[in-house]
Amino acid sequence: METVVVHTTYDDMEAEMIRNLLDENDIQCQVVSEITHAVFPLVHDHRLAKIRIIVGEQEVQRAEEIITGFLNSPEPSFDEDELLENDDSDQDSA
């Protein structure tokens, strides 16, 4: 089976979120990096820290649509006052 790189990033967390998202959609993928990030977590040379998401060629279109939707989705916004009110009411009920 041929494989295709569908996304490249330098962010471990982004790569892991994409891996989980593809897994939730029954798309098998590989996350490949040139270095072991656990051993060198603070590498600043992005050429060494590049992470590639790879899928089978039959899943490329679906994977790209899922990844694009994820990357283009708005970040959640939180109302700080609402969070503080909810936190206060949680403490009152304890």
Image (tube, rainbow, N blue to C red):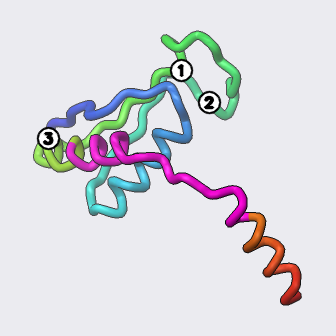
Asked where in the image residue 40 lies, by quadrant, the reply is top right
Q: What amino acid type should be assigned to the residue bearing mark 2?
A: His
For residue 49, the mark is: 1
Marks 2 and 3 sit apart, C-alpha to C-alpha, by: 27 Å
Q: Quadrant of the C terminus?
A: bottom right
Q: Are marks 1 and 2 in contact (CB under 8 Å)?
A: yes
Q: Which residue is mark 2?
A: 37
**Position of residue 75 in the picture relative to residue 41 (left or right):** left
Residue range (magenta):
65-83
Disc 1 is placed on an element classified as helix
- SS class, disc 2: loop
Which residue is nearer to you in this view: 79 or 68?
79
Residue 68 lies in what quarter of the image? top left
Is label 3 in a helix, a strand or a loop?
Answer: helix
Label 1 vs 2, first from the N-terminus: 2
Which disc, if any, is residue 66? none
Q: Main secondary structure of the magenta part?
A: helix
Callout 1 environment at 10 Å: few (<14), some (14 to 19), or many (20+)?
many
Which of disc 3 and disc 1 is earlier in sequence? 1
Give, as a three-letter code, the residue at label 3: Glu
38 left or right of 47 in image: right
Residue 86: image location, x then y, percent: 73, 73
The residue labelled by disc 3 is 57
- Front-most of residues 54 and 78: 78
Q: Is residue 54 above or below residue 78?
A: above
